[in-house]
Image (tube, rainbow, N blue to C red):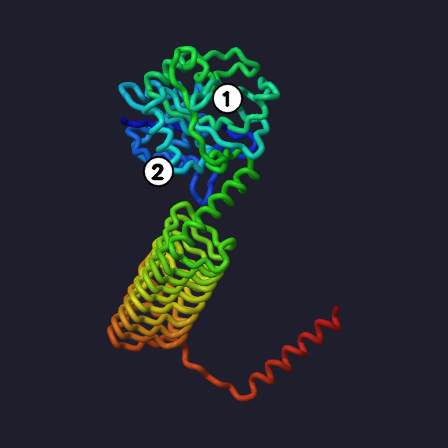
Amino acid sequence: MTTALVILAAGKGTRMKSDLPKVLHPIAHAPMLVHAMRAGAVLSPERTVVVAGHGADDVRKAVAVEDETAQVVLQEEQLGTAHAVDQAREALTGFSGDVVVLYGDTPFLQPDTLERMVAARATHDLVILGFEAADPARYGRLVMQGDTLERIVEFKDASDEERAITFCNSGLMACDSKTLFSLISEVGNGNAAGEYYLTDIVEIARSRGLKVTAVACDEEQTLGVNSRADLAAADAVFQTRARVELLDLGVTLMAPETVYLAADTVIGRDTVIEPNVVFGPGVTVESGATIRAFSHLEGCHVSQGAVVGPYARLRPGAELAENAKIGNFVEIKNAEIGEGAKVNHLSYVGDASVGAATNIGAGTITCNYDGVMKHRTEIGEKVFIGSNTMLVAPVTLGDGAMTATGTVVTKNVDPDALAVARARQENKPGYARKLFDMLKAKKARQNKGA
């Protein structure tokens, strides 16, 4: 059976107190909506339809980055969840298969949960996702009779006996496309809010004699985000899960609670992550690497055996080969660092390539920006860059070259050549004493005048 996803993402999220659409607020550097899309991707959907409203243009851009085949439709008026799903009707014209309805602000669904929902469709016409709530509060209750879902009762309408039920409605469901839109066509808005509720299709389906059931998942998977506090809690949930997964894969986290991971962080086994490391989007760390304390990585690739930090920053485009070493207070941007090369102290290497076994001395800077354009620095293999060297790009240093400490390199250096470019030192006997006496006298006059 083929599957389509309908992801509801039209809410403004007033409680977020933000101009940004609620579903675009990030968890682990990825919008909530993207988390929902990735969760649904396990079903290999034939079509994905995102129903947008507030900030639709921004939502469309985010969707296109994640899945350029997904379609975004607009819910111009927010008239309830059934109305929102109905906006996908035209986009699913000609589709025959199951529709799985997800929410863009429910980012933690697990693959097996969605697979169980779709599997339950083999014996039921409509499948609802429920959860056992620790505090049912004002959730809608799922009234079950065996494996049959009799009805969904909203808290305000529930009897004392029904309020005692802890099996609650998540709002997610799976149904054959034709049946789903047929049921929605019968949903009315005769309620206090004047809205068309998707949950009403359960009662309509039962009145038709259709088979309805509910699949259970743990409550954490249904966690919705409606406020900044919810967002922080959701991020904490993601981080805890991601850290446990890394530990299970054989990654050493010396202080797990201090490591911040992105949604797409990939780290190989036997890698050691020291405390207070932050991973931004687009980071891959191969097996056996070491990321030392207080380092920040984003958009980079770290090969096997490499060491990063402490207090290092890898920016987008940083490529570290095997056994490369990036030390304290070093920044690498859009640069390839060759096998066994070292950039150990207080240096900036940007828009550059550094050959294997090259040593970059402390305080080295690739001067890559002229105020208008970026330029590259090419450094060969087994090069020794003396401390406090300025490499004014574009410039190339051949294999085995060397720069003297304090050199400003403005032209290419041949292989095995030594580059020296600094003013000759002059020592003037007694001048230090004379200068200090002059400065002290000047200060005394100023203090007297004050």
Identify the amino acid type marked 2: Glu
In which image quadrant can residue 125 be found?
A: top left
Q: Residue furthest front?
A: 146
Q: Looking at the figure, which quarter contains the N terminus? A: top left
Number of residues whose C-alpha sits closer than 10 Å to that of mark 1, classed few (under 14), some (14–19) or many (20 or more): some
Question: Left of 285 or right of it: where is 412?
Answer: left
> Residue drawn 42% across and 66% down?
327
Q: Which residue is mark 1?
A: 143
- Residue under label 2, please give it: 66
Residue 445 picture quarter: bottom right
| Depicted 109 relative to depicted 336: above or below | above
Question: Would you say the residues marked 1 and 2 are in contact, meaning their CB atoms lie under 8 Å apart?
Answer: no
| CA distance separating discs 1 and 2 | 37 Å
Residue 251, image quadrant: bottom left
Nearest to viewer (mark 1 / mark 2): 1
* 424 and 406: which is toward the camera: 406
Vertical relation: 267 (above or below) 204: below
Tell me what residue is drawn at x 32 percent, y 33 percent: 43
Q: Identify the residue shown where x is 39% and y is 14%.
A: 183
Q: How many marks?
A: 2
In this view, the residue in front, 421 or 277, is: 277
- Which residue is rendered at x = 29% and y = 64% of the image? 378
Which of disc 2 and disc 1 is earlier in sequence?
2
Q: Nearer the viewer, residue 20 or 427?
A: 20
Quarter of the image that includes the C terminus: bottom right
Q: Please indicate, yes or no, whether residue 34 appears anywhere in the rendered image.
A: yes
Q: Amino acid at mark 1?
A: Val
Give the camera-side residue of 5 and 9.
Answer: 5
Q: Position of residue 435 (x, y in %)?
A: 59, 81
Compared to residue 34, the image places residue 197 above or below, namely above
